[in-house]
Amino acid sequence: MIDHAIAAAKIGGQILLQNYGKLDPATIEEKSAFDFVTAVDHQSEQAIIHYLKSHFPEHTILAEESGIQQTVSEYRWIIDPLDGTKNYIHLFPWYAVSVALEYKNEIVVGVVYNPVRDELFTAERGQGAYLNGNRIGVSQCKNLAQSMLATGFPHRSKMLLNVYLKSFSQLFQKVSAIRRLGSAAIDLCYVACGRVDGFWELKLSAWDIAAGTLIVQEAGGRVGDLVGGQNHLETGNILAANAYLYEPLLNITRTVFRGHLECITQ
């Protein structure tokens, strides 16, 4: 099934590339405060769904823009047709397509395609993680002071800014650098291939992180929520890092976010 996930992600990626820089402002809609969708999001999503449904008509589909198409199947595709919509709108060239397959509530296939760099990140449960066909692994950084992290601001929930900034402040003082790229899917893949050593963010959706989560795990990294649990796909509150730094980072996020879960669960 990973071959079909790859094909689907590349179909979406080609649509994004073909329409990059050609957006009609009239086709940009505000889904909710500070959250936007474009006609290209919809076009990419429908093309991906059409492809997957043509091969797996019995499977459930969960996609960002069209929601869930429920069936009785134990397989569920989780699709983000354009992760980094705001980047895309502003011609900031950093965005991706994310396609994951869940079986019996476990992610078993993950594909993230960055069409700008033509980088294809893939993973199958128990089979390792790959970038353009080459095996990848998380960094071997053991020292927080030498590490570089990625993050994302809670733009959908600005009421969380104070608690987020508290986590940012504490981590910023302990690591060498923090970057914010605007695509959680790419952030997770960069943890997986060692370009950054860890990543944390609040209030994401399952389609933002489902594929990337598996890719990190198959690359030897660890993923969980911000207080030590494993409900990141449900809450959207996520921490990912290499095996050496995960616990030191978790000690900080757990201290900051414990007691605030009622505010940041979805």
Image (cartoon, rainbow, N blue to C red):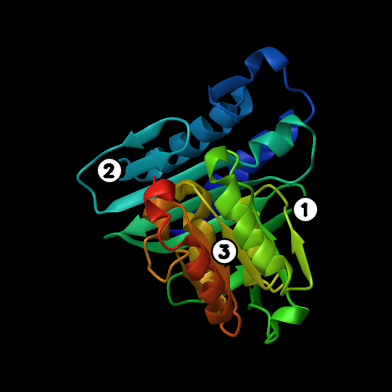
Helix, strand or loop status at disc 3 = strand
| Residue picked out by circle 2 | 58
Earlier residue among tags 2 and 3: 2
Taking the spot 59% from the left edge, 28% from the top edge, the residue there is 36
Can residue 188 be spotted in the picture? no
Q: Residues within 10 Å of mark 2 (few under 14, many from 20)?
A: some
Residue type indicated by callout 3:
Thr
Can residue 109 be spotted in the picture? yes
Q: Percent from the top left, x then y, of residue 161?
A: 59, 46
Q: Percent from the top left, x then y, of residue 185?
A: 59, 54
Q: Which residue in the rendered view is the most extreme toward the top?
A: 26
The N terminus - image quarter: bottom left
Q: Percent from the top left, x then y, of residue 151?
A: 65, 57
Q: Nearer the viewer, mark 2 or mark 3?
A: 3
| Residue picked out by circle 3 | 122
Q: CA distance from mark 3 to mark 1?
A: 15 Å
Earlier residue among tags 3 and 1: 1
| Residue picked out by circle 1 | 117
